[in-house]
């Protein structure tokens, strides 16, 4: 029997949609009607109401409505559900018929048009022949209607039209053909949907009144529960349905039909569940569609088993004639009926012979069903679901069933591929019983595929498949041109295990590279191999890592010999290899690319068991993890045995240069001073036993530092000349020549740093030396690096200060160890100034860290141009070098730019002569000297302002005339009244020829305060007191 028999009808599986018939639209000759139809049907989005539209003529013939029964008391039904009932109500009988008619409210021939519209409506009602289908009228109008209540004519004519057509006001609609047509159409759809719902609710009540217990189907209930986001209700309904039907098997000769029906039930529910998930429902690991697909596959397997038992008992029986499954109409009236029992209500067969022929026909058709394909499809759906919800073990379990089903379908390639995929998981988790069963099936598939020399057939194989496989084996063997083949066991857990390791992550080039290979077999008996070879990324090393032993029948087992290739079960065998690395490989990795173990003889057939990398297999990672988590103490093994779990894989090693036997020392005095030729002495002494050849020195700023440091650092070997921009920051490959054993050489490096900061300097010494490794002469290149951090600081701080108002300038210096070989001098930039004293104090002075020195200069400024008040003093140049520097090291000149000074032109110069202190109530003579420095006669007004601390005698206010270049003297006697620092009476001078001149400029030349001592008491006064 075809599996499509158990498929649910398409009317039940599709989304229920209200059927609405449209009449009165001319799709061929009327463009407006065409636009209306396109708005209804074209580009319908998911958010629009579910309506199925169809254009029908007004006099279309609908299915006739049978006469309604007044009583069902003596009615015996011929079946449960007619095959055409759902199709009739979904596609043939509309819930609503809409009559479209072009009519405006201001139509001149309104009466005629109204009558014509009423006639069309009556024709539609007559065609429906008494059905409860709703009827509505849509008036297509050219103008946009006014809001309700504003157009009185429209209201009157609408009421008249409804009365003529026998319609309610809710069944009359207006559709203006304007730019907003789609919006009006959507509003119409919603109204149509409400009318359709009213019709369907009425039909439901009518059907329920006939047969209350037949008004529901489980499929539809589950679909509605999923749509309303109540999946638990759907699952409960389905379980109730299954519990009710799972034991109602029916005829024993057709028991496979019940299994097929049950399989389809679970598959349909799984499809509903999956569809709901795609629409937004959330599923979990323990409740997802995969379980229902899995159960469907289980019933499909039962279906297959029962079909094999019931339909193949006598293969020589032919299909009955005439065909008992054919009907006169080609279809059945009711679902679930037998074709030879239509119209028969009794459970007993009407004709035993027809019953027997029908059962035989169903059994014969069942032989053509490809059960394995159905089972594989269901298992594939279940695997996809369990993979989606991260259930790896369920997925693996079902993939095994898929592989076995492919095996039964004789598709051995796909079966082996699936089983091979899951074997890794079962090996890793060590499910040995399951793995054995899977391997048995995989071995049968491999044999039946016939890919190697023909062996004995595997047990329990189908005899016809064995014969076909033997023919394949014979063809393959005759075409085979090679006696060897390779098995890659990296992704399996083979019968022999391998681990390889270098004894160190790195080896010096003058020390032999050592490698251990460990082998262990899990066979029940000893097994002998003929060759072990290790391959490297550099194939030149392959020749040093080979163990070869020809197999002979007289060989006996030797448990510990190095050359013995016989492996004893569960005993670890270690093989040691050693070779000298090439000097060209210094700085490179030696990596194990493969380990090959040969089984058999080159004279006949042989197998290479191949491990990628340094060995290991699919279970190695899991074993290592279990070993780290295990708290069991490992048993102590004899000294000559190795614990397999304690061996780790080391697949690569690095070849590094020979350890240098040379001493490199750096001598210098830190810190460095900016711009000096900083000396660093590199001392190199050989500690080799032979001559060190081609010795080269690379020294300077270590690469990779800040670019600003690189651009301001210069290195040279010539310390007699100052470095400039033409010198590099790093001197490469300075040739030293050869060094005899114990010989020592020194090289002086001179470094000039223009900026402060910490710099890392590198000294790299390389050389070549001849040595012997494993009786092999090699030339080793050695090198040694030394780095040093040198901080560069400013040698001294210079502070410039004007110490008096008479242009005396003082320099204060603080520095590190500096020697001034030349005196400090002022550059020619000061040639506009006149030195009052030309004597330098800082000449050939040696200062230690933290010490300071100072000197003063007196400058007289010449006349300046009018309007200019800022004058540059020039530069102060300091020539110096480090005290410990060699004689040939040049002197560093540090240029200090002196600050600008503000120069003001003063026509008079005044100064005062007075004692250094005074006494209370004793005369204090003060003489003021006033000098005219201009070429004009100056009229001067001078006054002395009184002070609370002094009385004075002399001219309080006077007017003088001072000739050019001459000076006047004014004498005053001040009489102190109080002791301590007291403010002197201030002198105020006004120049009549210079109205803008103020005496504030002159007061800077005059003392403003003086210390006054107390009265002196003689001894006689003290005695009297």
Image (cartoon, rainbow, N blue to C red):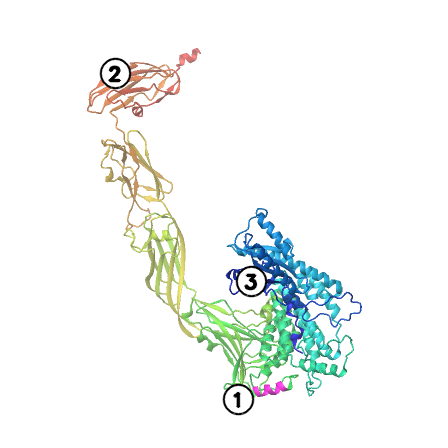
- Few, some or many residues within 10 Å of mark 3 (<14, 14–19, 20+): many
Residue 959: mark: 2
Q: Would residue 262 be found to the left or right of residue 536 on screen?
A: right
* Quadrant hosting residue 814: top left
Q: Earlier in the sequence, mark 2 or mark 1?
A: 1
* Closer to the camera in the image, 270 or 194: 194
Q: Which residue is mark 1?
A: 478
Magenta span covers which residues? 464-472
Task: Give the x, y percent position of residue 556.
Answer: 59, 84
Magenta highlight on residue 594? no
* Closer to the camera in the image, 238 or 894: 238
With respect to residue 469, does 13 lie above or below?
A: above
* Quadrant hosting residue 763: bottom left
Q: Give the secondary structure at mark 1.
A: helix
How many discs appear? 3
Of badges 3 and 2, nearer the viewer stands 3
Task: Give the x, y percent position of residue 858.
Answer: 27, 32
Q: Which residue is mark 3?
A: 25
Between the residue at mark 2 and the residue at mark 1, the CA separation in whole angstroms equals 144 Å
């Amino acid at each position: 029997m075809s599996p499509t028999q158990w498929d649910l009808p398409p009317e039940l599986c599709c989304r229920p949609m209200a059927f609405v018939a449209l009449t009165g639209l001319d799709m061929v000759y009327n463009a407006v009607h065409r636009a209306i139809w396109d708005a209804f049907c074209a580009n319908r989005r998911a958010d629009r109401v579910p309506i199925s539209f169809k254009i029908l003529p007004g006099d279309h013939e609908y299915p006739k409505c049978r006469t309604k029964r007044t009583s069902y008391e003596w009615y015996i039904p011929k079946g449960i559900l007619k095959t055409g009932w759902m199709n009739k109500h979904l596609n043939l009988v509309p819930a609503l018929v809409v009559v479209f008619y072009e009519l405006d409210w201001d139509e001149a021939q309104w009466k005629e048009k109204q009558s014509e519209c009423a006639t069309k409506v009556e024709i539609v009602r007559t065609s429906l022949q008494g059905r409860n289908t709703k009827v509505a009228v849509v008036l297509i109008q050219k103008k946009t209607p006014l809001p309700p209540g504003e157009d009185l004519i429209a209201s009157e004519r609408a009421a008249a039209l409804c009365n003529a057509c026998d319609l309610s006001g809710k069944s009359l609609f207006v559709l203006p053909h304007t730019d907003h047509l789609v919006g009006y159409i959507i509003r119409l759809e919603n109204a149509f949907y409400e009318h359709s719902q009213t019709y369907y609710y009425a039909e439901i009540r009518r059907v329920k009144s006939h047969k209350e217990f037949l008004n529901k189907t489980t499929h539809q209930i589950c679909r509605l529960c999923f749509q309303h986001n109540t999946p638990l209700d759907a699952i409960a309904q389905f379980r109730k349905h299954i519990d009710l039907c799972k034991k109602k098997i029916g005829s024993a000769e057709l028991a496979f039909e019940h299994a097929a029906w049950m399989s389809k039930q679970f598959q349909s529910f799984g499809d509903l569940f999956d569809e709901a998930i795609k629409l937004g429902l959330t599923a979990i690991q323990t409740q997802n569609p995969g379980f229902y697909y899995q159960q469907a596959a289980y019933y499909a397997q039962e279906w297959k088993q029962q079909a094999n038992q019931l339909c193949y008992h006598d293969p020589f029986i032919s299909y009955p004639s005439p065909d008992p499954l054919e009907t006169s109409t080609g279809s059945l009236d009711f679902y679930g009926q037998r074709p030879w029992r239509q119209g028969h209500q009794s459970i007993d067969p009407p004709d035993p012979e027809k019953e027997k022929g029908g059962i035989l026909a169903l059994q014969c058709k069942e032989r053509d069903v490809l059960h394995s394909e159905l089972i594989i499809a269901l298992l594939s759906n279940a695997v996809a679901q369990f993979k989606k919800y991260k259930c790896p073990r369920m997925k693996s379990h079902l993939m095994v069933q898929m592989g076995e089903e492919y095996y039964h379908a004789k598709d051995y390639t796909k079966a082996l591929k699936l089983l091979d995929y899951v074997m890794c998981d079962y090996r890793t988790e060590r499910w040995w019983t399951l793995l054995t069963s899977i391997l048995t099936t995989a071995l049968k598939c491999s044999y039946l595929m016939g890919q190697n020399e023909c062996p004995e057939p595997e047990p329990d194989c189908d005899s016809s498949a064995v014969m076909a496989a033997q023919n394949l084996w014979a063809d393959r063997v005759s075409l085979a041109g090679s006696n060897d083949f390779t098995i890659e066991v990296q992704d399996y857990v083979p019968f022999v295990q391998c681990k390889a390791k270098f004894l160190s992550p790195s080896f010096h080039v003058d020390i032999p590279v050592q490698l251990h290979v460990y082998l262990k077999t899990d066979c029940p008996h000893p097994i002998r191999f003929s060759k072990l070879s290790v391959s490297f990324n550099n194939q030149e090393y392959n020749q040093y890592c080979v163990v070869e032993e020809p197999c002979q029948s007289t060989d006996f087992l030797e448990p510990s010999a190095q050359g013995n290739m016989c492996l004893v079960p569960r005993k670890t065998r270690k093989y040691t290899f050693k070779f000298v690395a090439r000097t060209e490989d210094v700085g490179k990795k030696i990596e194990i690319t493969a380990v090959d173990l040969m089984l058999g003889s080159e004279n006949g057939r042989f197998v290479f068991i191949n491990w990628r990398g340094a060995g290991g297999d699919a279970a190695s990672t899991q074993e290592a993890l279990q070993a780290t988590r295990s708290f069991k103490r490992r048993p102590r093994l004899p000294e000559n045995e190795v614990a397999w779990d304690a061996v780790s894989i080391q697949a690569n090693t690095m070849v590094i240069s020979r350890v240098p036997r040379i001493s490199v020392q750096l001598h210098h005095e830190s810190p460095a001073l900016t711009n000096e030729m900083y000396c660093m002495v590199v001392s190199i002494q050989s500690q080799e036993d032979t001559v060190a050849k081609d010795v080269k020195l690379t020294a300077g700023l270590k690469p990779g530092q800040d670019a600003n440091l690189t651009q301001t650092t210069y290195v040279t070997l010539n310390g007699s000349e100052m470095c400039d921009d033409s010198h590099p920051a790093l001197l490469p490959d300075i040739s030293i020549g050869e060094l005899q054993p114990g010989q020592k050489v020194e090289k002086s490096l001179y470094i000039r740093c223009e900026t402060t900061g910490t710099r890392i300097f590198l000294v790299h010494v390389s050389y070549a030396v001849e040595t012997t490794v494993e009786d092999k002469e090699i030339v080793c290149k050695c090198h040694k690096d030394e780095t040093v951090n040198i901080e560069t600081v400013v040698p001294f701080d210079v502070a410039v200060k004007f110490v008096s108002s008479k242009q005396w300038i003082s320099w204060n210096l603080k520095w590190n160890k500096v020697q001034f070989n030349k005196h400090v001098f002022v550059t020619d930039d000061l040639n506009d100034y006149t030195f009052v004293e030309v004597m330098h104090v800082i000449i050939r002075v040696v200062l230690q860290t933290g010490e300071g020195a100072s000197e003063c200069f007196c400058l007289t400024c010449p006349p300046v141009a009018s309007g200019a008040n800022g004058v540059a003093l020039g530069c102060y140049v300091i020539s110096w070098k480090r005290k410990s520097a060699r004689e040939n090291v040049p002197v560093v000149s540090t240029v200090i730019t002196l600050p600008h000074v503000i120069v003001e032109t003063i026509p008079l110069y005044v100064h005062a002569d007075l004692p250094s202190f005074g006494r209370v109530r004793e005369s204090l003579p003060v003489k003021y000297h006033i000098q005219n420095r201009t070429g004009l006669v100056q009229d001067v007004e001078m006054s002395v302002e009184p002070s609370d601390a002094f009385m004075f005698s002399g001219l309080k206010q006077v007017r003088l005339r001072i000739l050019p270049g001459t000076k006047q003297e004014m004498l005053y006697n001040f009489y102190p009244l109080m002791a301590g620092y007291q403010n002197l009476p201030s002198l105020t001078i006004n120049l009549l020829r210079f109205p803008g001149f103020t005496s504030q400029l002159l007061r800077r030349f005059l003392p403003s305060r003086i210390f006054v001592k107390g009265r002196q008491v003689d001894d006689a006064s003290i005695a009297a007191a």
